[in-house]
Amino acid sequence: MEVVIQPDAGAIATLVADEIERLLAARPDAVLGLATGSSPLAIYDELVRRHEAGRISFARARAFMLDEYVGLPDAHPERYRNVIDREIAGRVDFAPGAVQGPDGNAEDLVGACAAYEQAIADAGGVDLQILGIGTDGHIAFNEPGSSLGSRTRIKTLTSQTRLDNARFFDDDVDAVPVHCVTQGLATIMSARHLVLVATGSAKAEAVHHLVEGSVSAMWPATIMQHHPRATVLVDPAAASRLQLGDYYREVFAAKPAWQGI
């Protein structure tokens, strides 16, 4: 696992956008994994800037979303399909239908989960997966206690996750759905490169467990320690609980520029 400590969200976004630009230059038909929440927003803004400047195209790329709420109306602004369209997919040149997400309103949710898992496999898997992390260590909506071998499935959100996400629902926790459809931890681990972004002191404890703790279902993101190519990008506040913070800074400072992240 590579840990990269950067001054702020803008610097993190630049590094991640650099990596995505390199990937699409080498493989224009690459498959990206897109996350929602606050963490990736600066990345999406940077990608849009580069697209508008003619530096990057998504015309041949495909993308898969991590998760979706169950039961939100199709037109609801916080339905993740609409969030992804608003923040990135609708701002660049993805082809129609190139961005897919799990169907949280399917009549057969179990069947929809299996179909989504198959769609990712049929696309050849995800080349680069963007991730955030919850204050309780969840990635996607794999809450504490999730199976480390889990695949796309229905999950019940914890009270902490619903409280954290209430800010997107006018601070009304009762408006946050109780259930979701999410890629499983094993699904996420099948991506070829995991790129997790975290900023702010509220994420410091989760980042500490992710990077330096034991692998445990109680902190689901810790499964990333077993991934052959996982990059964790954090600002100083999110890195504040890391015992080896100075070492991570030294390692990245000594890294050849051509390696990227």
Image: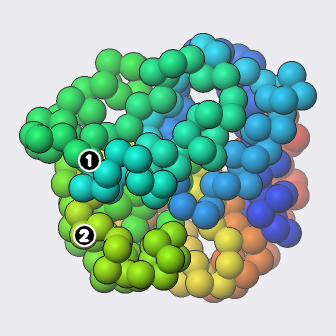
The residue that disc 1 covers is 104
Label 1: state its secondary structure. loop
- Near mark 1 (Cα within 10 A), the count class, few <14, some 14-19 or many ≥20, is many
Q: Quadrant of residue 200?
A: bottom right
51 vs 177, nearest the viewer: 177
- x and y, in percent, of residue 173 in the image: 37, 81
Q: Quadrant of residue 203?
A: bottom right
User: Which tag, 1 or 2, sits closer to the chain's start?
Assistant: 1
| Mark carried by residue 178 | 2
Q: Can residue 249 be seen by looking at this rendering?
A: no
The span from disc 1 to disc 2 (Cα, nearest Å) is: 12 Å
Q: Can residue 238 be seen by looking at this rendering?
A: yes
- x and y, in percent, of residue 117 in the image: 26, 33
Q: Quadrant of residue 30?
A: top right
- x and y, in percent, of residue 155 in the image: 21, 61
Residue beneath the point at 39% across and 19% down: 123
Residue beneath the point at 46% across and 57% down: 78
Q: Quadrant of the N terminus?
A: bottom right
Left or right: residue 137 compared with residue 243: left
Q: Quadrant of the C terminus?
A: top right
Residue beneath the point at 35% across and 45% down: 74
